[in-house]
């Protein structure tokens, strides 16, 4: 399942806190339209590479990128800055 929301939490030692919910699911239809627009060019390039003997498959590359992005769901990242006493938490849902 592809990520839908990224939660960014920034907290300083003195209590200042910032919570951002970034709706990534809004971007997925845009990426789909861009992929469909680029798909004919990828097929032509893949065919040219196949005829020339080069073993690079551009469409497989997009499948790999999709797999990596799909596996990001559930990732939690925590970064502490000791110099400025702040904590940054990133959660991908």
Image (tube, rainbow, N blue to C red):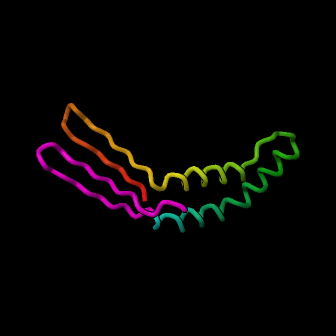
Image vertical order of residue 39 relative to residue 65, above or below: below
Please tell me in which quadrant of the rendered image residue 29 appears. bottom right
Q: Position of residue 79 (x, y in %)?
A: 32, 40
State the image coordinates of residue 73 (x, y, percent, origin top left). Answer: 48, 56
What main secondary structure does the magenta stretch of the protein show? strand
- Residue 38 lies in quadrant: bottom right
Between residue 37 and residue 84, name the one nearer to us: 84
- The residue lying at 32 percent from left, 53 percent from top is 8
Near-viewer residue (15 or 24): 15
Residue at image position (22%, 54%) is: 18
User: Residue 17 colored magenta?
Assistant: yes
Q: What's the residue at 88%, 46% (across, down)? A: 51
Looking at the image, residue 84 lies above or below residue 48: above
Residue 68 is covered by the magenta coloring? no
Number of numbered discs: 0
Magenta highlight range = 1-24
Q: Residue 14 appears at what percent x and percent y?
A: 11, 45
Task: Give the left or right position of residue 44, taking residue 65 as reference.
Answer: right
- The residue located at (35%, 57%) in the rendering is 7
**Above or below 31: residue 83:** above
């Amino acid at each position: 399942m592809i990520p839908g929301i990224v939660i960014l939490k920034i907290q300083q030692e003195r209590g200042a806190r910032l919570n951002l919910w970034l709706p990534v699911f809004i971007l997925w239809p845009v990426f789909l339209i861009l992929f469909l627009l680029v798909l004919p060019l990828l097929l032509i390039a893949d065919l040219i590479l196949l005829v020339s003997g080069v073993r690079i498959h551009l469409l497989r590359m997009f499948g790999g990128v999709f797999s990596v992005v799909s596996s990001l769901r559930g990732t939690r990242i925590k970064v502490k800055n000791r110099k400025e006493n702040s904590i940054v938490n990133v959660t991908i849902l």
